[in-house]
Image (cartoon, grey):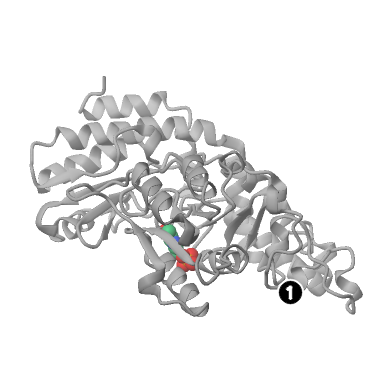
Amino acid sequence: MYKATLEYAQQLDKEDKLSYLRDQFHIPKDKEGNDWLYFTGNSLGLQPKQTQQYIQQELDDWAKYGVEGHFEAKNPWMPYHEFLTEKMATIVGAKPLEVVIMNTLTTNLHLLMVSFYQPTKTKFKIVIESDAFPSDRYAVQSQLKFHGFDPEEGLIEWRPREGEELLRIEDLEQIVSEQGDQIALLLIGGVNYYTGQYLDLKRIAEIGHAKDCFVGIDLAHGAGNISPELHESGVDFAAWCTYKYLNSGPGSLAGLFVHEKHAYNKELPRFAGWWNHNKETRFNMRQPFDVMAGGEGWQLSNPPILSMAAIRSSLDLFDKVGMAALREKSERLTGYFEFLVNQIDTDRIKVITPSNPKERGCQLSIQVKNADKSLHHKLTEKNVITDWREPDVIRCAPVPMYNSFEDVFRMVEILKGLL
Ligand SMILES: *Cc1c(COP(=O)(O)O)cnc(C)c1O
């Protein structure tokens, strides 16, 4: 069993085979030079030290070769996105064919809905979680409007029961069994950004497909945090950003997954550009459009190499360590965090994230009574970086790549002091 002492936390760090990784990241510091207690890797992951060299390489090759860098650069820019695909696919449990890195998350959701939201007069509704991230909500509302539907009528919210915070899969099942004939699409956050609840993607896919609905997953809070086994889950599509748990820098590019079962379907409606045209004939210029198979078939433009260099740096780290080892540490790290928080004798806070490690990633969402936001401000004053999400939650994500058991211990000591 865990112990609530600094010595014990330090002992856990000594036994942690991944503790060497912390040194490979830039940890922000306060004015006195002490490391911040950084718990917002779910919002913006920290910078791997090696990222600078990866970006510098492309700047140097651009200086040296100009346009010829597309072929002559050490990592030629023409196929650059392909260097990322396999490692990204491994992280989310997909086949390389199914994955591509392009654009940003909300943009990818829209491009995917061009293909997988095909409403008819009677089957046009979209299901989201009631606590969906605002961008996802706005995206589906605007899709409904774009297709001529009233978002009020077209949007179905899967919500927690009265007095509960978490979603129950049987409630989704009921929504879809009752209204499935009118539902065209389920678009669900695989790990909810607010509660940290990790949902059963395979069940969601089965529930949707039983009523001929397409099923899409937003994995913004899943990629690099949990192992979602996307291919196995059978969902039709997914998208995620890489600046949260995947540590690739502010506003960096996003991932896209389209299940293999759709990889060769050239009839799917989609938008086109030269980058989803067959790469063999792309530069013959006057060809009729010939869409590529798989995830690459959703690209439009040639991608920003500097952002991809940062992603490449991060994926190389993930590849070295492996999601299995990261998950193992993560379960222990968050388990210890939960143990310590639960030891605080107070009724002012409550952890709303599921306590079953299989139903969460690393984040714990701490609900604060009477939505007292001052608690979050005071944590920040003490260099504990967490975030506040309206209406009443402090989100804290101990990230296995760079957070330590000692970080968690110190954080909870400060929290306890403030309460
Ligand atoms: C972070 C996040 C976004 C952000 O979208 P961008 O297009 O990258 O700005 C969208 N949806 C969810 C669920 C998120 O967690």
Q: Is residue 189 above or below residue 279?
A: above
Residue 45 seen from this side:
no
Residue placed most toward the observer, 362 or 117: 117
Q: Residue at x 47, y 27 (%)?
A: 17
Nearer to the camera, 219 or 270: 270
Q: Is residue 391 left or right of residue 200?
A: left
Point 27% across, 60% down: residue = 389
In the displayed structure, 313 sits above or below 290; it is above
Q: Is residue 32 left or right of residue 52?
A: left
Residue 324, image x, y percentages: 53, 32
Residue at 91% from the left image edge and 74% from the top image edge: 284
Horizontal side of 267 relative to 185 (left or right) equals right
User: Camera-side residue: 313 or 211?
Assistant: 211
Quarter of the image for residue 290 reads: bottom right
The quadrant where ligand 1 appears is: bottom left
Dot 1, how many residues are within 10 Å of its Cα: few (below 14), some (14-19), or many (20+)? some
Secondary element at image label 1: loop
Circle 1: residue type: Gly
Q: Position of residue 227 (x, y in %)?
A: 51, 39
**What residue do we see at 28% from left, 46% from top?**
166
Q: Is residue 325 above or below residue 44?
A: above
- The answer to whether the beta carbon of the residue marked 1 is less than 8 Å from any atom of ligand 1 is no
Rendered location of residue 274, percent (x, y): 77, 73
Q: Quadrant of the N terminus?
A: top left
How many tags in the picture?
1
Q: Can see residue 89?
A: yes
Q: Name the spot of residue 154 as percent of width and height, x first.
A: 41, 69
128 and 303: which one is in front?
128
Q: Which residue is mark 1?
A: 273
